[in-house]
Amino acid sequence: MAQAPALPRGFELPLEPRLPRIGAIDAVALEARAGELAKRSIKKDAKLAALDLSIRMMDLTTLEGADTPGKVAALCSKAMRPDPTDPSIPSVAAVCVYPNLVAVAKERLAGSAVKVASVATAFPSGQSPLAVKLADVSAAVELGADEIDMVIDRGAFLSGRYAKVFDEIVEVKAACGEAHLKVILETGELGSYDNVRRASLLAMAAGADFIKTSTGKVAPAATLPVTLCMLEAIRDVHDETGRIVGMKPAGGIRSARQAIQYLCVLNETLGSAWMTPALFRFGASSLLNDVLMQIRKQRTGAYQSGDYFTID
Ligand SMILES: O=C[C@H](O)COP(=O)(O)O
């Protein structure tokens, strides 16, 4: 009997013995290093450049049960022209919505460079049969999603069924077709940095284009140490295999100050090659206005009220 064609597997499991040992994270050192990087201060010009980059790297997100086409249309306007009074402000990288709202986002963003990202695979729990998850992905792609943000099956991961997690990611990647795949680890449920590293390597091995911390529905969501841990996994995979994988911290990132801290950690860990929206995104529902306010402050020396800017 003819064999089914092999699915793409990124690079091979078991996570190469040449990769640094998985269970080797020194939590105290990791948190100390993240804390030290967070204290870096940067000069005014560099700060303005970082704020501009933070906008260009943003996946402007709404993931509420109460989302409507009207809310998503307003979000898309904001994504394309974050400050309608200031054409020098760039557009964000993408809007991130539920599958039901992909079509409206796609239509509103037509002709712009802003991508449409859709969550899928029974977001946020991932607790559905694989066939349902794949149908979710296919529907989002058919509706026009450029990017798919999937969740891993944390229940399977935490009970040691790594092959199930791996194979699901491989199948989701195949269902994505041309759409880019971001794999959400939901690090707040993984329990240890060793597990964060293990899940990061697993997701990259299975074909993730990006690895993402969180859904935004579970606390803690993105943190600097968790992000550093994932960036180090990306660095090690790149060193060992040459493969380039992107990173998306998401959930709880609400201030320009936090965004700059993340960029410092990124720059120190992966260098300037990763300082691009093609390889780093912020998943955030309410970060944009603070970044706009800080840009205004840096330029004029005065704060503009948050009310001045439209919804985000
Ligand atoms: O992927 C993005 C997150 O859902 C956004 O979380 P947030 O509402 O805490 O910014």
Image (cartoon, rainbow, N blue to C red):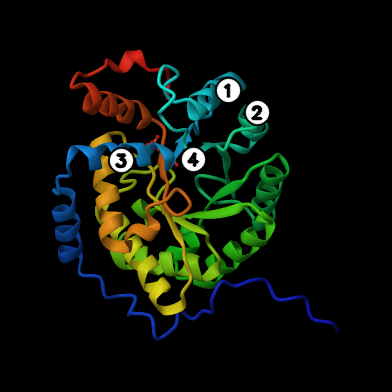
Whether residue 226 is visible to the viewer of this picture, yes or no, is: no
Tell me what residue is drawn at x 22 percent, y 28 percent: 298
Separation of residues labelled 4 and 3 (CA atoms): 16 Å
Amino acid, disc 2: Val
Rendering coords of residue 76 (x, y %): 54, 27
Amino acid, disc 1: Ala
Quarter holding the C terminus is top left
Q: How many marks?
A: 4
Mark 4 and 2 residues: CB-CB less than 8 Å, in contact? no
Secondary structure under the numbered disc 3 in the rendered image: helix
Mark 1 and 2 residues: CB-CB less than 8 Å, in contact? yes
First in residue order: circle 4 vs circle 3: 3
Rendering coords of residue 188 (x, y %): 34, 51
Q: In the image, which disc is placed on residue 93? A: 4
First in residue order: circle 1 vs circle 3: 3
Rendering coords of residue 232 (x, y %): 32, 66
